[in-house]
Amino acid sequence: MKRTALLWIALVAALLSGCLRKEILDDISIESAIGLDDAGASKIRGTVLIPIYKKEETTNKTLTSVSISVNDLLEELQHQASEPLVNGSIEILLYGKRLAEKGIFPFVDHFHRDASIGTGLYLAVVDGTAERLLKGHYGRQGNAIYLSNLLKHNIEQRDIPKTNLHLFLKAYYADGQDPFLPYIRRAGKNVYIQGIALFRGDRVVDYIQRNDLFFFKILTDAYTEGTHTLRIDHNLYISIKNIATSRNISFSGSQTQPHVHIHLSLEGVVREYKPTPFSPSIRPLIERQFEKEIKKKTSELIKRFQQQQIDPIGIGEWAKSHYRRFRYRDFYRRYRDLPVHVTADVRIRDTGIIE
Amino acid sequence: MASPTESICKILTLLKRSRDFQTKVYQNQSSGQSVSVFYIESLVDIDMMVKYLYPYLIHYPFTSLQHLADVLPLEDAHLSSAPRDVQQKLLEGYLAIQLIEQDDLVLLVKAQKKIERTLTIPEVEFSVVGPKESFIESLETNLHLVRKRIPSERLTVNLFRVGSLSQTKLAVVYVDGIADPENVQTVIQRIQTIEFDEVIDSSYIVQIICDNRHSLFPQLLDTERPDRVAAVLAEGKVAVMVDGSPHALIGPTTLVEFFSSFEDYFSNWIIASFFRLIRLFSVAFSILITPIYVATLNYHYELIPKDLLGTLITSRKEIPFPPIIEVLFLELTIELLREAGARLPTKVGQTIGIVGGIVIGTASVEAGLTSNVLLILVALAALASFTTPVYKMGNTIRLLRFPFLLFAEMWGLLGVAFCFCILMTHLLSLTSLGRPFLSPLFPPRWGDWKDAFIRLPFSEQAKRPLSLRPKQPLRFNSDKAKAKRDIENIDE
């Protein structure tokens, strides 16, 4: 009895294994990046990047096709590939500026339904077309790794706030928040981060330039390692590397007339100072000056968001957890004129080893 | 077997068919009595006979066999009239002395020839520090080695004979008052019911008395170190020693015990724990790495980190086989090398190892038959399997990866998980002398973890392993062991 059962299990196991589709690593074309552009007439032009691995260097191959949906597009591209295309290790999804301004959500949907794709992959909006950017040749490890490393270190150590597919979808689905994505551009043989693309729903409505990234990051992300140079007058400037920031959003007033208080505290280290030497007496001055600058710049940014009727900081979500029986619709009806007060607290912890 | 009707005379005639059976007749000078001496030449120490027995036989005026037995300065001399006893003793190397032929009474004198090698250093369980004695083939010597380490009246040795043809002497050793009588009874009962003709070695016993004969896992620990036997006897385990075997068996044992080298007890507890963990990790690595390779390359390319993808693809690009064939090819090559190395004399074996390892490995990569990434993995897995301190367990580990490979090929990582479930089910149901094999992992015996995956300092080892159910749970007073004693405190 036991033996027959065992035999059956073995038989079924062996037979069922035939139903499994094998994807042997060297017999598949692994897509590493996909770029989507607007092709007019509600069609998209998709570019798939396939790395060709060689001993010394990884080269890039791109396949391009036009279709109405992402799924259709990938099916279409299979006809051009000698080995089956698989999308389990996509590093980055790129959206052309024109498509992004029309709305990208229908073209994100496919990727978050696919179980083989993780939600940690990067999304970015391209100034120009994604196709042109992907057809370049950057770095020795292939374009996809180049691009994802470019974003990765800027997110982890510099002034780009954390973004990936997961966070994009979270902000997209949240009622009290709007998504944002890095905004990149090809310049000859290089790619550089130009700023941040701000979304209303799934459409890009505004861009933050590089100068404002520092302030945008301390508004949206909890901890940064960014550096900011403060110009006090034309021959006095100081570079401050912030080692820890925290932001606190609180509310006062009734639900019908809320006041938003954003408190930003920042601890920093002096990295460069001119004219040297840095005297301890100047420290409070610089702290106050920096606080003033933070207040001014972030208030400007928030004003801009309010005029565009977008909320990348997620003030709505904070308000939701503060007020009982909160209604997003009412909140955002008043959003444009919402009084937002920014306070900042800067502390310089260290002035470098030369002191 | 001799029936009761058989007489001594008949037995002697039966034995006479062998050419090495000798019959000598002597006449005593004083009494004039004729004495016949029977013995098997190949078993008897002739020197002893000439030196101690003949002077008495020829010159001493004895009156009866009993008289002779009383005066002989030899270890064992007794009278016997049982034909069966006479036969057995003759076959063990005794001399049989008869006064007048046809007499029913025989004097049996022990004059065994003892040929045994001297004590050597342990080769399988070699340790850099610690005692360098290992068991040899003689049971008496082996018992001596254990007994001198436990000079206590509580150390109990039970002797048995097993094997209808071999009549092998076997000793069950335990410390009375510490070992669980139930464990001792289990061993004795199983040994008494052994049905086998020729028991050569203790590994025969292990296969006959183990709980599950179809399991890949050895269920009694075998060791060639008398110090290890003494140490585990003190924990409350039972040892079985077989005459003619330089390996003693220890039970009840657990899975983790097979991965603890006795050298662990000779070094600091942190170092010992580190090496134990390394060993356990290397076992898991050795079993799982090639199945994971096969599963990942066949089904789960998305699990491979992006930086590794290029390395793997470039190394696999030229290979004409699917991963499973590639892996089986290399794994079987390694097994071949190991087997060839084990069968050949030591010096030739080493050469084979080098030739096989370097030449076949490099050549197969250059010929494009295997990828160099896999070559590294297989070599590491083989190396890791050799870290297992118990040789028999090492063999089990090496065999275990093949079912895993099969499942990985069929079902990918799901298959590996499935195979792991089967393995765990088997291990959970496995017992050693009726005690759970997976203890202290399951059933969880947290107290026993102090000497399982890690080894805590001796001062923490006051309690004997709970899973052995020792009659005396405490080894020593742990408070006194932990107290720091300086010179001024000793008097208090």
Image (cartoon, rainbow, N blue to C red):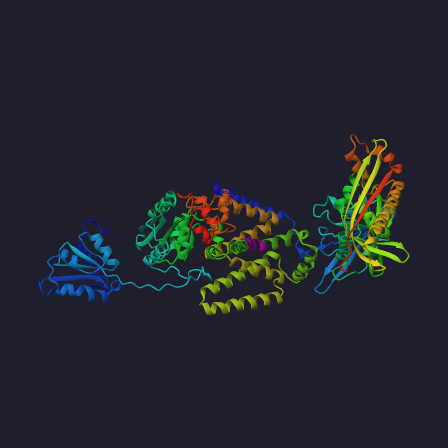
Q: Quadrant of the C terminus of chain A?
A: bottom right
Position in image of residue A33 (x %, y %): 76, 53
Kindly identify the residue that appears in the image at 51 percent across and 66 percent down. B353
Q: Is residue B216 visible?
A: no
Name the side, left or right, on which B488 lies relative to A297.
left
Image position of A325 with respect to B309: above or below: above
Name the side, left or right, on which A16 lies relative to B103.
right
Nearest to the observer: residue A112 or residue B282:
B282
Kindly identify the residue that appears in the image at 83 percent across and 31 percent down. A255
Examine the image and state in which quarter residue B343 appears.
Answer: bottom left
Is B137 contained in the magenta span? no
Nearest to the observer: residue A278 or residue A2:
A278
Residue at the left extreme?
B31
Position in image of residue A273 (x %, y %): 83, 58
Position in image of residue B440 (x %, y %): 49, 45
Nearest to the observer: residue A200 or residue B376:
A200
Is B282 contained in the magenta span? yes
Nearest to the observer: residue B437 or residue A238:
A238
* Span of residues in magenta: B280-290
Name the side, left or right, on which A322 lies relative to B115.
right
Image position of B384 with respect to A123: above or below: below
Kindly identify the residue that appears in the image at 53 percent across and 43 percent down. A8
Count up the numbered dots: 0
Residue at the top extreme?
A325
Position in image of residue A188 (x %, y %): 85, 61
Residue at the right extreme?
A234
The overriding secondary structure of the stretch rendered in magenta is: helix
Q: Is residue A173 visible?
A: yes
